[in-house]
């Protein structure tokens, strides 16, 4: 009998023996996606209903055992895996994967937290609607995890982050009570808007069990272009023209440095990356740009042509390919979405998901590239991201002849210090997308004001006074 035997037996009665995992290889729940750390869970518990989640939480609270909510475990900041103590319960939501209700007139869908994003997108499309949240991890990340991290992705320029897509939540509190806020209302000023506390809280305040999300009409046509641009300044100029020409039709604007693209060429040679023949010095960046049109394909193409004409005239596009059909559009997007996977294949790396005013990004990158190359000769900069939102993945790969693990051990701190100091100077954010988790918790202390940190601590302690919900993540108490 271990000190937790009684709790584990209790949990088995709640969710069934098969859904309390304690033995065998628990790596899928214990390793983070980036393979930065492996934790050790007391158990992985897989409830199938909100009531079961609530009962599990109450049992854990009674036993003084802390919990780590987990969805698809695709998070980037070591926030969804247990610590090394072997005393935490991983609360996996993946069995709660039902779409509860599609309300066509209200343009909403109510869905359980463990539903895989791609399944939700496909179900909405089948019903004739667009659920616009889109990211490369959509085949395995869950809507609960998207809400937990306030995920961004590639459609933010038009539809906003996950927060903007959410109208209501159902949450199991840190005490095991159920708060049902699935009203689907677009206007409601009855006091504090609780949903916004839980969105982006990374499992530290409670467990999201379901959500009511916004739907949009499906566009009549979606066109994608892949363009080679002569500089990052030119990419920003192209973004301005795209806003002007396409207005709300602009649904995606991503930038990719040529080194980032070369990793896709290297690790996924079956993909055909355009413009390999153009010298990097002539076109150091490429852009993926998407236009969604509610009129017709002909209208979308005509708009695109005008945009590209003025862009070429202004000298901000060197060359461009426009996808002829949906399959080609998917291929072009696939190139962009393969960069994180290609980077992972290249080896352990340092990630930065920073945001800065779009207008200042070229200067930031020029300054930072020079500073890093001077301080860490041979360092490889994997620079890409959601330029339309001012959100850059300013990632750093070890020099090609270096031991990546050793590089991370010795250089991650000084590199982060340089990058984040510059982000501060530019009034930017050290995390625009992936959140804080464990990896950036100490950095948050340095980059957020004492007043903001104090308010965050007060919220955490008010909602989770025993500090049992994903303790040690986001905020240091
Ligand atoms: P998990 O990784 O399981 O959890 C993430 C956090 O949310 C943890 O802190 C966890 O405790 C908490 N959490 C999970 N479920 C719940 C719940 N039900 N209630 C409360 N808290 C919960 N992110 C972006 O923002 N934009 C991108 O473009 C993007 N692209 C990616 C591409 C790749 C290839 C990969 C691997 C990741 C990418 N990510 C991106 C990061 C990641 O996919 C997102 O953060 C995603 O939202 C996490 O969802 P998940 O279900 O995997 O959550
Ligand atoms: C993306 O935009 C994701 O592809 C992942 O946010 C970014 O791997 C990264 O650094
Ligand atoms: Zn991203």
Image (cartoon, helix red, strand yellow):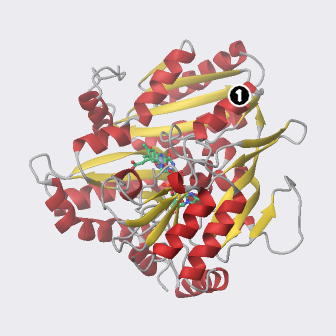
Who's the residue at 57% across and 17% down the image? Answer: 326
Mark 1 CB lies closer than 8 A to ligand 1: no
Residue indicated by mark 1: 125
Which is more toward the observer, 16 or 403? 16
Of the pair 253 and 23, the residue shown nearer to us? 23
Report the side of 259 relative to 291 (left or right): left
Residue 214 versus residue 157: which sits nearer the camera? 214
Question: What residue appears at the point 44 percent right and 51 percent down from the top-left corner?
Answer: 392
Residue in the picture at 60% in, 41% down: 117
Q: Could you say where residue 232 lies in the image, as x and y percent from the top left?
A: 41, 43
Q: List x then y, in percent, for residue 390.
A: 52, 52
Q: Secondary structure at mark 1?
A: helix
> In the drawing, does residue 143 fall left or right of residue 421?
right
Q: Is residue 169 left or right of residue 358?
A: right
Vertical placement of residue 430 versus 444, above or below: above
Q: Residue at x 66, y 68 (%)?
A: 55
């Amino acid at each position: 009998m271990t000190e937790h035997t009684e709790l584990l037996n209790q949990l088995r009665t709640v969710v069934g023996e098969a859904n309390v995992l304690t033995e065998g290889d628990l790596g899928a729940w214990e390793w983070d996606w980036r393979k930065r750390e492996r934790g050790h869970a007391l158990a992985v518990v897989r409830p199938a209903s909100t009531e079961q989640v609530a009962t599990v939480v109450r049992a854990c609270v009674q036993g003084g055992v802390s919990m780590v909510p987990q969805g698809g475990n695709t998070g980037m900041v070591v926030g969804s895996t247990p610590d090394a103590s072997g005393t935490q319960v991983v609360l996996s939501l993946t069995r709660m994967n039902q779409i509860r209700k599609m309300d066509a007139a209200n343009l909403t869908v109510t869905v359980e937290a463990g539903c895989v994003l791609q399944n939700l997108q496909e179900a909405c499309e089948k019903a004739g609607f667009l659920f616009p949240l889109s990211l490369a991890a959509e085949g395995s990340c869950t809507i609960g995890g998207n809400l937990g991290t306030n995920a961004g992705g590639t459609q933010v320029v038009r539809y906003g982050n996950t927060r903007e897509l959410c109208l209501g939540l159902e949450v199991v509190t840190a005490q095991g009570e159920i708060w049902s806020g699935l009203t689907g209302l677009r206007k409601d000023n009855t006091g504090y808007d609780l949903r916004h506390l839980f969105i982006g809280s990374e499992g530290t305040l409670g467990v999201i069990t379901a959500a009511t999300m916004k739907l949009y009409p499906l566009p009549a046509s979606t066109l994608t272009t892949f363009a080679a641009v002569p500089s990052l300044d030119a990419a920003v100029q192209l973004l301005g023209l795209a806003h002007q020409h396409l207005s709300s039709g602009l649904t995606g604007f991503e930038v990719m440095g040529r080194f980032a693209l070369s990793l896709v060429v290297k690790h996924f040679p079956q993909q055909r990356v355009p413009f390999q023949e153009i010298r990097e010095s002539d076109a150091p960046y490429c852009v993926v740009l998407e236009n969604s049109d509610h009129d017709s394909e002909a209208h979308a193409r005509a708009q695109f042509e005008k945009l590209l004409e003025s862009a070429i005239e202004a000298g901000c596009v060197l060359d461009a390919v426009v996808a002829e059909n949906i399959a080609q559009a998917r291929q072009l997007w696939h190139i962009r979405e393969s960069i994180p996977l290609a980077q992972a294949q290249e080896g352990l790396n340092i990630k930065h998901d920073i945001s800065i005013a779009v207008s200042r990004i070229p200067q930031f990158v020029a300054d930072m590239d020079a500073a890093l190359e001077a301080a860490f000769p041979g360092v490889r900069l994997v620079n890409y991201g959601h330029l339309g939102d001012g959100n850059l993945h300013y990632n750093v790969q070890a020099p090609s002849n270096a031991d990546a693990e050793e590089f991370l051990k010795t250089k991650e701190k000084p590199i982060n210090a340089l990058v984040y100091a510059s982000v501060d100077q530019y009034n930017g954010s050290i995390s625009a997308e992936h959140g804080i988790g464990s990896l950036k918790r100490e950095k948050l202390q340095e980059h957020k004001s004492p007043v903001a940190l104090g308010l965050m601590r007060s919220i955490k302690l008010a909602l989770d006074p025993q500090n049992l919900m994903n303790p040690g993540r986001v905020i240091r108490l």
